[in-house]
Image (cartoon, grey):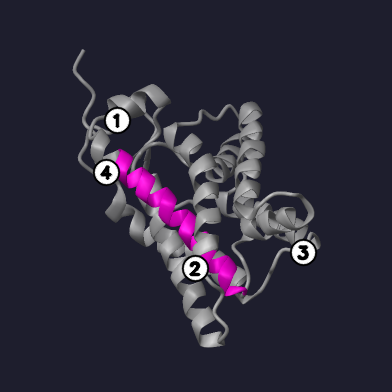
Amino acid sequence: MTSDVHLDRGRGPAVRRTRELALLGPVAQLRAGRLPRRLTQLAGGLVLYGVTLAMMIRATLGNAPWDVLHQGMAIHLPISIGTAVIVMSVVVLLFWVPLRELPGLGTVANAILVGLTTDAALMLIDAPEGLPERSLLMVGGVVGNALATALYLGSQFGPGPRDGLMTGLHRRTGVSIRLVRTSLEVLVVVIGWLLGGVVGLGTVLYAIAIGPLVQLLLPLCIVELDPPAAD
């Protein structure tokens, strides 16, 4: 997920105590300090992300764009929706190779933990019958998903597979992030819908609201890193 928060593209962690996301390699991420806080926030964010995906699916008012595809895959393949999330994460990571994107600990954890949590939450969350209850579940899922995104990005362990694909395409092609994101999401929604995934008002709500919500919440969730050691 993208936001207007500044990205520090230097080799080391941000020196200034500002609300920035540092683009670090895997080793630098582990050397950046505050590991207990950051690892806890990463795990909490990814678990919450999986739970909120399940909430939106159970609301049956339209899935998040990528989950339209995941649900469509689960309909036609002998796999669960959570497994579809993991499979597509691996596929998307393969596209990172020509883009020369470097996955971090958070990228790998995202690829696995979100799918496992989604399946577990789907077993625990029942689909409500009334439209008001379904609407509340959908809205809660969207808001919670934005918070989850801000938490795992703010832990400074790298973007998720789909986020990295978006930013990588932007960096390599020069096309705006907004256009890259829109194009990717329209593509996966169309494919997922053709496969039987649920598209509806919830899909539109997610597409419209998730960016501004993450932009609002991310600065509050970024963990400040230790400055690099002097040479």
Compare marks 3 and 1 and give the one earlier in the sequence.
Answer: 1
Q: Hey, which residue is sitting farthest front in the picture? A: 123
Q: Are marks 3 and 4 in contact (CB under 8 Å)?
A: no
Mark 3 or 1, closer to the camera: 3
Q: What numbered label is drawn on residue 196?
A: 3
**Does the rendering let one see residue 5?**
no
Alpha carbons under labels 2 and 3: distance apart: 24 Å
Q: Quadrant of the C terminus?
A: top left
Q: What numbered label is drawn on residue 13?
A: 1
Q: What numbered label is drawn on residue 209?
A: 2
Mark 2 or 3, closer to the camera: 3
In the image, residue 14 above or below residue 57: above
- Magenta region's main secondary structure? helix
Alpha carbons under labels 2 and 4: distance apart: 24 Å
Q: Amino acid at mark 1?
A: Pro
Q: Amino acid at mark 2?
A: Ala
Q: How many marks?
A: 4
Alpha carbons under labels 3 and 4: distance apart: 40 Å
**Would you say 141 lies left or right of 99 here?**
left
Compare marks 1 and 2 and give the one earlier in the sequence.
Answer: 1
Alpha carbons under labels 1 and 2: distance apart: 30 Å
Give coordinates of residue 100: x percent, y percent.
58, 26
Disc 3, SS: loop
Q: Amino acid at mark 3?
A: Gly
